[in-house]
Image: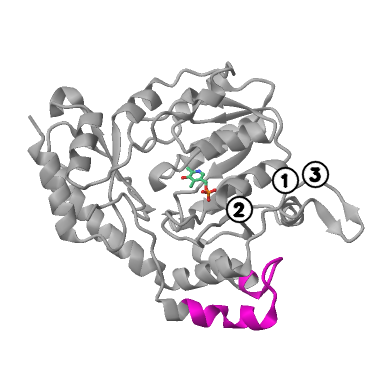
């Protein structure tokens, strides 16, 4: 049987059945129901964030955050991310300006941000890629100096803490994704954590057609509300999250032990003071030292039933849909990382033996 890069965590089915009984009885299926409100409160506590708003998915959450913060102009961001980050900026009427990433944890290279700022710059949208926290202090200092907003793409960063603070407590807002493939999921879902409580009302309007009340509509908003069945799934999954992250951690430690001394395999550096969520296990393949390319290793793993992912490749600025735009910014590090990265299978149910098998194939391919 093939081993895929991820496998959704599921709570025991009895737990979910029990959770949805009151939904069945009340017929309140969506629009800020009881499960929605309960999940919102519990997540606020777990994520250690001051305020939280739930959404139908992470992408809509990000678009609504950009709308609610009234970001229209140039937005500094990185192209080493999922399509969603760049799409959200463009779809809400702004222009992405691509900043390169650093090569130690693949987040935005803070030394390159200031050189990209113009009088049109309104915000920075950095990505906590693979759950590696951006340099939040340096980014805040730049934002303060130039009066810019910060909206983090924290889709990978559920539960991460920096010096005991929730990752979603930094910047003006942070988007979390609760997609089925993420560390914590609500089947589909997402959230915006935010600093200023005044944003609560506008986020609620942006996710609900811009409606204020029965007779008043303020914004040209879409529909992005989380329903009760998804919220119920979230309540169940939240009970098992710590246990799932602990299982992931064990697997990551094992991967690291097996691969740390393999010539030509580059692992992500871990930083001090961070509580990680072990959401992904990316490796870079240095062809010169390893002997074969990333694509060849991907192919060989696949032949043996191991489905790794070139995540993220290509960088978003190379997508066909962006070719006709002449967005600024050369990003050589992002290009190189995207061309050499492979994320290996990682999910709570993965067996240690499977990790050994995968590592042995990787070691066997070495020249
Ligand atoms: C998953 C993801 C998103 C989008 O989240 P959805 O819940 O799938 O809409 C955005 N950015 C990144 C980096 C992601 O991995």
Q: How many marks?
A: 3
Could you say whether the residue bearing mark 3 is in a helix, strand or loop? loop
Residue 30 sits inside the magenta stretch: yes
Tag in front: 2 or 3: 3
Q: Are marks 2 and 1 in contact (CB under 8 Å)?
A: yes
Residue 258 sits inside the magenta stretch: no
Query: What residue do we see at 10% from left, 40% from top?
Result: 363
Q: Residues within 10 Å of mark 2 (few under 14, many from 20)?
A: many
Direction from residue 297 to residue 243 in the image, left or right: right
Image height of 311 relative to 215, above or below: above
| Residue 290 percent coordinates (x, y) | 14, 29
Q: For mark 3, what is the residue?
A: 220
- Mark drawn on residue 99: none
Could you say whether the residue bearing mark 2 is in a helix, strand or loop? strand
The tag earlier along the polypeptide, 1 or 3, is 1
Q: Picture quarter containing residue 334? A: top left
Q: For mark 1, what is the residue?
A: 68
Q: Quadrant of the C terminus?
A: top left
| Residue 207 percent coordinates (x, y) | 71, 53
User: Bounds of the magenta span?
Assistant: 16-36
Q: Residues within 10 Å of mark 1 (few under 14, many from 20)?
A: some
């Amino acid at each position: 049987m093939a081993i895929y890069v991820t496998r959704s965590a599921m709570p025991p089915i009895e737990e979910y059945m029990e959770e949805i009984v009151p939904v069945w009885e009340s017929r309140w299926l969506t629009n800020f129901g009881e499960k929605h409100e309960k999940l919102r409160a519990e997540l606020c506590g777990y994520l250690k964030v001051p305020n939280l708003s739930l959404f139908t998915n992470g992408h809509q959450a990000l678009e609504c955050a950009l709308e609610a913060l009234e970001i229209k102009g140039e937005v500094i961001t990185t192209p080493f991310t999922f399509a969603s980050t760049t799409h959200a900026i463009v779809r809400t009427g702004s222009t992405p300006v691509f900043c390169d990433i650093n090569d130690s944890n693949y987040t935005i290279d803070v030394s390159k941000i200031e050189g990209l700022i113009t009088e049109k710059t309104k915000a920075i949208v950095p990505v906590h890629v693979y759950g590696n926290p951006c340099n939040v202090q340096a980014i805040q200092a730049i934002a303060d100096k130039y009066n810019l907003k910060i909206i983090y793409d924290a889709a990978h960063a559920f539960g991460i803490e920096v010096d005991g603070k929730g990752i979603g407590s930094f910047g003006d807002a942070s988007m979390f994704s609760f997609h089925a493939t993420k560390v914590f999921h609500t089947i589909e879902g997402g959230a915006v954590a935010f600093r200023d409580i005044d944003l609560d009302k506008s986020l609620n309007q942006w996710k609900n057609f811009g409606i204020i009340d029965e007779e008043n509509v303020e914004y040209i908003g879409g529909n992005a509300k989380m329903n009760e069945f998804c919220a119920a799934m979230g309540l169940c999954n939240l009970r098992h999250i710590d246990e799932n992250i602990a299982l992931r951690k064990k697997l990551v430690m094992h991967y690291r032990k097996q691969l740390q001394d393999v010539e030509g395999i580059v692992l992500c550096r871990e930083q001090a003071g961070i509580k990680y969520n072990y959401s992904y296990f990316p490796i870079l393949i240095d062809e010169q030292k390893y002997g074969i390319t990333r694509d060849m290793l991907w192919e060989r793993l696949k032949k043996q039933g191991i489905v790794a992912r070139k995540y993220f490749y290509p960088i978003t600025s190379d997508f066909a849909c962006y070719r006709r735009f002449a967005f600024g910014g050369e990003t050589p590090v992002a290009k190189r990382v995207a061309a050499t990265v492979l994320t290996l299978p990682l999910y709570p149910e993965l067996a240690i033996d499977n990790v050994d098998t995968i590592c042995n194939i990787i070691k066997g391919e070495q020249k």
